[in-house]
Image (cartoon, helix red, strand yellow):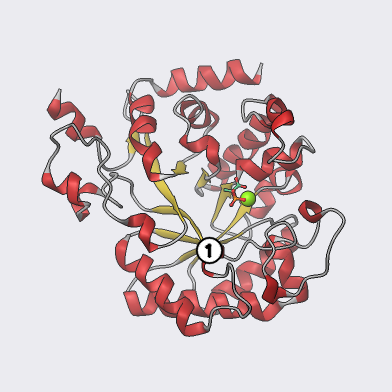
Amino acid sequence: ARRARLRTSRGPGRTADGHAVKLLLNIGSAEDLAPHDPEPASGGTSAEQTGGAEAGVGGTGAEGVGLFRTEFLFLDRRQPPSFEEQVTAYAEVFGRAEHVIVRTLDAGTDKPLPFLGLPQEQNPALGVRGLRVDRLLPEVLDTQLDAIAEAARRAGAEPWVMAPMVTTVGEASDFARRARAKGIAHVGVMVEVPAAALRAGRLLQEVDFLSIGTNDLAQYTFAADRQHSALADLLDPRQPALLELIALCAEAGRQAGKPVGVCGEAAGDPLLAPLLVGLGVTSLSMAAVCVPAVREALAGLTLDECRERARAALE
Ligand code: PEP
Ligand code: MG
């Protein structure tokens, strides 16, 4: 039993018949990459317990970071973090993990940051948030992209970046152009708005990958505030309308030969993860604590069984 666990506790997640699915981490800072013992009572190897390279990122066996939420660096301040401060924070993360997808600032009137000085809005979730802040304050994104590129140079890493709350192909191509102009090779967008999911194929002509944020994609698909507990049934990621949008993105990725992952909470749920794999997503990004259960859930089903679950859920 020990050998079996060690074999499956690092590297890609795999279905019972060997179909590989990247397991990645959602983090807010380098501290989230501190060594983490996935099974404290397991008597695992020292590499698993210390989080060495052998044990994958943070000791979880994960292959990288699928979502580095950078807004934590910007919270509770009157002035934005300086270029140097940003470079230091990003370089620390690049130094600790092999494959890191940095999400550019996801702020706005629903996640207010005083220094942005955005006007009050009646419907913050539908207002100037995520990439839309760039319409009013383009220097914030330009500085951040410069800092990401510089941090990667200093750490000797290949940076991947993605933008939150992208709605149109025009927004995606503008973002990709600016990120590539800074020397960032891997540029993607989050799919959090149904309009973006519907245009997934076209988006993939502009960018290298998609990452589906199911928390926001559910909110905007069902017109239900993601914090509203009375609407939890609408926000359930098993809702077929949401699954259809995910399937559409995964199929677009398959046709383009480009990765399409999920980084919302659904990816870390062992009941949902196989279903998402059955829909065709190529990676799952989650909190470190979720990795062992998701790995185990995938290992217990063949790809066909995952597809069957997806078909049944869509029904
Ligand atoms: C999401 O919306 O699913 C997501 C991953 O982004 P956040 O939760 O940070 O809005
Ligand atoms: Mg989101």
Q: Looking at the figure, which quarter contains the N terminus?
A: top left
Q: Residues within 10 Å of mark 1 (few under 14, many from 20)?
A: some
Task: Please state the horizontal and vertical placement of residue 224, each as a whole percent of the image.
Answer: 77, 37
The structure residue drawn at horizontal position 52% and vertical position 80%, both measured from the top left corner, is 146
Q: Is mark 1 within 8 Å of ligand 1?
A: no
Task: Please state the horizontal and vertical placement of residue 37, each as a whole percent of the image.
Answer: 25, 43
Q: Residue furthest right?
A: 122
Q: Looking at the figure, which quarter contains the C terminus?
A: top right
The structure residue drawn at horizontal position 39% and vertical position 68%, both measured from the top left corner, is 158
Q: Circle 1 — which element?
A: helix
Kind of residue indicated by mark 1: Phe
Query: With 40 as the anchor, is 241 left or right in this view?
Result: right
Query: With 29 as the anchor, is 69 left or right in this view?
Result: right
> For residue 71, which quarter of the picture?
bottom right
Circle 1 sits on which residue?
72
> For residue 138, which quarter of the picture?
bottom right
The structure residue drawn at horizontal position 51% and vertical position 22%, both measured from the top left corner, is 307
Q: Pick the residue in front: 123 or 255.
A: 123
> For residue 294, which quarter of the picture?
top left
The structure residue drawn at horizontal position 29% and vertical position 44%, both measured from the top left corner, is 60
The correct choice, above or below, for 252 with respect to 205 in the image is: above
The correct choice, above or below, for 160 with respect to 2 in the image is: below
